[in-house]
Amino acid sequence: MAITGLSRRDVLAGGMTAALALAARGAGWAQQKELVANTYGGGWEAGHRLAIAQPLEKRLGVKVTLISMLAAELVARTKAAAGGRPPVDVALVDDGPFLLAIKEGVFQPLPMDKIPNAKGIFEKYRPKEPFGVPIGASQIGIAYNSKKLKTRPSSFADLWNPEYKGRIGLSTPASTLGTVTLLSFARLKGGDEGNVEPGFEAVKSLLPSVASIQAVPANLRTLLERGEVDIAPMWHHDTSILKSKGTGVEFVVPKEGGIAGLAWLAITKGATTELALEYINQGLAVESQQTMAGPPSFIGPVVEGVQVAAEWRGIVPATPQDLERLKTLDWPRINLQRAEWINRWNREIKV
Amino acid sequence: MSAETAAPSAVGSVGVGRTRGRLGHAAFWTVMWTLGLGALLYLLLPTLIIVFASFTASDYIAFPPQGLSFRWFVKLWGFEEVRASAGRSLLVALAATALSVVLGVAAAFPLVRSRFPGREGLNAFLMSPLILPSLVYGLAALMFVSAIGVPLSVPVLVLSHVAVIVPYVIRTTAASLMLLDPHLEEAAMSLGADAWNTFLRVVLPNLVPGIATGGAFAFISSFDNLTVSLFLAGPRIETLPIRLFAMINFDLDPAAAAISAVLVILALAVVLLAHWAIGLTRIARF
Amino acid sequence: MTRGGGGRGLSRRWTRHLRLWQLVLPASLFLAVYFAVPLVMLFWWSFHAPGVAGLTLANFGKLLTDAFFLQTLWLSVRLSLEVTAVTLVLGFPLAYLYTRLGPVWRVSILFITLLPLLTSAVVRSFAWIVILGKQGLINAALVASGLVDAPVKLLFTLDGVRIALAQVQLPFMLLPLINAMEQLDPSLEKAAVSLGASQAKAFFRVTVPLSAPGVVAGAILSFALTISAFITPAMVGGGSFIVMPTLIYQSAIVTLDWAIASTTAFILLAVALLVVWGGMAIARRYRYGPAGA
């Protein structure tokens, strides 16, 4: 039973070392902090974990938990927690909900001097108010299954091609994707954020070819993956995920130019601010943006200096040339009308 | 005694009548068996399919799976959030089950052995969480807890789970107790044992299968629970079903299928335990 | 049961004072505080509207005159009735077979019934998302059997949710049915056949009416659980339509309108109870009615 080769002294020494190590770790534990950050599911979560959470954990020895929560719920829960701990420390929200959340007063103003990496943000994406920073960009285009459809679309106008009849998927304005889709159609027919009528008319005339309309973009992606629809207006990052799975889905940048959607990071009121600022700063670092621009997230970088692999060039908007072809939208104006658009869509657009 | 009955053909039939009787007989049982087997397949297939799909070697969910591999289970283990939420679910379920067993076993005794006014009503009350929609209860519990100013936390979640799972323990313990021969206890006491010893050495060991089964059902109900947890857990107290729900809503990943397979295996273990402890046919009568 | 006192080992003085019925107190008090009180509070909330003092029916008025709300309520009721009917049609033959088969079959049937019950609703709904696609199993079977020419759109539709919900609720219909039918005397049916009835006639005239209590119990359970089902319609429906539980969740968590949430929950329970009572009334009439025996 005796452990040969180990004298009692060795065991004692070993024990003391272990005890000291534990004591040291204990002191470190007292300082260890925890951060809860919001993310979108799927590729975004994987990207944020790889590019932001893990480096942060390694560098600072803190614990970062990523959860996915929709903007509306996030705002509601933060307001409900007023005074206490908010549900998340760092929030991730799309353009539209971002502005609405600022109005609801759930975000803290950001001390931009504490986020040095923000200097690298593209001019086009720079925030106008100090309540958040963009962390990723996405461009809308056309996702189509090249294995099942012979003709490659080059523009939103091509959607009316008879080959696509019964194969098209759309999303409702309930999501950012759907709102941007509607505006893309509007732009095609000469409208814009102030005049969305041409957009509705275009969608209505396309209806005979539409196989499915989904309120949740993830469901649209599922349908595309499963072959229930074969062509749909979609964000480049979702499409790239499908492409990387070998499904045959390709992304086409419309020749009339696409629209960019931004995702914003903000800090909720009552959060652990210092750690949150570290998180945001890490997210804006070029290495992090580089990581997020690749698989499995394919998120368009918001800072300069990111290199995109050849296969994804043009799809993942990273260079100033890419950005030049992208339009950013007037979201305050959109927010005023969005509820009306959603209601109108629900009433008038049915497959 | 329960062999398949073959009814004799109609009395008084001659020739054609007898044939028609046999045809009708055959037709009847064909329909019954078709519907019955169909129902069985209907019950079983979805579970089987998701378990098989989790062994896919490909990057997306498909059935039949393209190639077989454990890679998604391995990958799952690497997801910190999945591990954390699984651990939390385990903690909550264990705590809730322990509490439920204490409360439930105690409550079963008077319900079976005592006669007091309102016993029937009390029994119905104690069983009511089983039929009240857990969605409504989750909402009510959230409102209650907010109204009394208690912040959401793991203990709050545990208590809410106890409320919905304690009926399982009460029911199986009571059923076991009813099957217990009171003569055993009388014999023990006539041999000199006092009430406490009788309880410990005679009653309790015979109740263990019932308590274990009820506890197992309670445990898995807590572990699986989504609707109550959706209301009462926060993003900081995520449980495994919540994480799974979020995963599936965003992306149909085989990782989600792997988590599902694990939950199915857990359910399998509970069913086997229940059969071994009490026997499924007896449980169906509870 | 003699009280403790003296004797060896663990007898305690307190067992002398402990009365048996008191053992039910901890569970009862706990449920009273943590189960009953919250529910009472929920109902209380539904009678209070923001900006209105005292008890009011304003919330009910607001909801019951809203077209969208009524539409959703009707959809929930309709869906639950349809699903319950399907589970009855599928469950009854299986329960009948159960009573006529041997122990191995019985255990197998129970096993297959209990396994989905103990699996989380999230997992079951997920399985249906996988199965309901155009290339999924259901469509493959439909096309192969020639029932349809091309794959049917099932995923993220109401039809798909019906199919998924029926499977999820089937165990809840099956178990009470089995319970009730087990207690029937099989010789009753045999007697009917020996008196000249065909097997089918004997089944419908003898067994079915006598199983009415089981049918009612199963239908009540199935209906109540289907109308309050949140997970399956949310996942398999994909947000393409809304049922009552979705409304409750949205108003409680997303818009934080607890007056509306509690009122919706109250109406949901009331409607479920109404349908249940109606069903029980019908069943009572059936049992003493002219059918069969």
Image: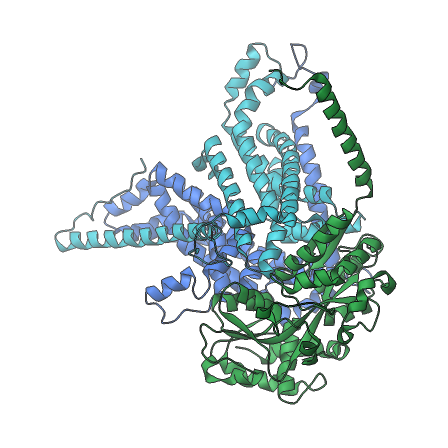
Comparing A168 with C82, the one in front is: A168
Considering only vertical position in the picture, is C195 above or below A25? below
Chain letter, cyan in picture: B
At a point 43% along the width and 69% down the height, the residue shown is C152
Looking at the image, the residue that sits furthest to the front is A5
Relative image position of residue B172 (x, y in whole percent): 54, 34
Considering only vertical position in the picture, is C157 above or below B204? below
- Quarter of the picture containing the N terminus of chain A is top right
Q: Is residue C182 left or right of residue A320?
A: left
Residue B34: quadrant of the picture: bottom left
Comparing A157 with C69, the one in front is: A157
Considering only vertical position in the picture, is A184 above or below A309? below
Please say whether residue C43 is visible from this viewpoint.
no
Q: Is residue A98 left or right of residue B169?
A: right
Residue C110: quadrant of the picture: top left
Comparing A245 with B172, the one in front is: A245
Relative image position of residue A220 (x, y in whole percent): 56, 69
Chain letter, green in picture: A
Looking at the image, the residue that sits furthest to the bottom is A190
Chain letter, blue in picture: C
At a point 55% along the width and 46% down the height, the residue shown is B74
Relative image position of residue B274 (x, y in whole percent): 49, 35
